[in-house]
Amino acid sequence: EVRRAINIGIDRDEMIQNVLNGYGTPAYSVCDKMPWYNEEAEVEYDQDKAKELLEAAGWEAGDDGIREKDGQKLEIKFLCSEGNSVLETLIPMVKKTYGDLGVDLKQTTVDFSTLLSNIQDTSHDSEWNMCFLATSFTSNQDTSANDSYTNNPDNMAVNNYSRVNDQALVDQLTKARADSDAAKSKADYVEAMKMAADDAGYMSVYSGMQFNLYNKKVDLTGTGTLRNWSQSMDTITVK
């Protein structure tokens, strides 16, 4: 419930305007806008509902405004990388948003290599419970979602940054990958993505727009959502 509350307590449109100057779209899933994307993953910004979820889960506001449960403060250890201009704008917004919800955000900044090393090593799990990681969404292979939610102890830390261990989701993803019928496989992946959204292990916030500039003599008509310019070099023509 805490993850769900945090997910709907974030104003994605506001972040896009302030962080990306409007050049982006809200994101809600690790497979945002892919063929197996499930629109039911989309949530509306609602701080009142977020507070209701937290209260229903037993997190009551303390005298200092921070929520408590069984003597424990509701604290997020937020791990992020240094030298990231996006975070200079994003962090103050996130702190205020979470503060309004009664969540204490404690930020730790490290270099990117350390961040990646720590989130892929379970021995550091006590040092963080949320991190900021700008990454591409799952590849054009739907099976990449199987890695993102794996609970295999041999590679869970390396691939499943969320650490969510949902056997029903893993079973659904395994079923989808095993389907020999493409349409059935897609339907099963779509269902899996709804289950993943309910877990709220990954909180996708926005998808930034990318701009590629080409010489007017270059024709790269083979580009698209799943095929960037470097993958389309086989179709290039020069006028």
Image (cartoon, helix red, strand yellow):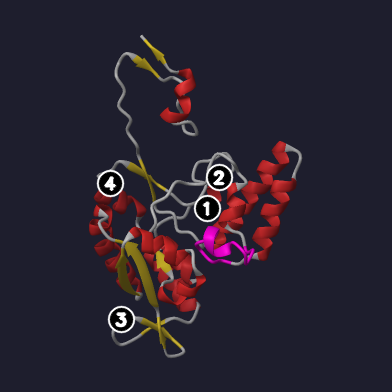
Q: Are marks 1 and 2 in contact (CB under 8 Å)?
A: yes
Find residue 41 and name its label. Answer: 1
| 90 to the left or right of 136 | left
Q: Earlier in the sequence, mark 1 or mark 4?
A: 4
Per the image, the residue denoted by label 3 is 65
**Residue positioned 37% across, 65% down in the render:** 47
The numbered mark at residue 37 is: 2
- Between 59 and 32, the one lying in front of the other is 32
SS majority, magenta? loop
Going 37% across and 59% down the picture, which residue do you hit? 113
- x, y percentage for residue 110? 31, 65
Q: Quadrant of the C terminus?
A: top left
Q: Are marks 1 and 4 in contact (CB under 8 Å)?
A: no
CB within 8 Å, label 4 to label 3:
no
* Labels 1 and 3: the sequence-earlier one: 1
Q: Identify the amino acid type marked 1.
A: Ala
Badge nearest the viewer, 3 or 2 = 2
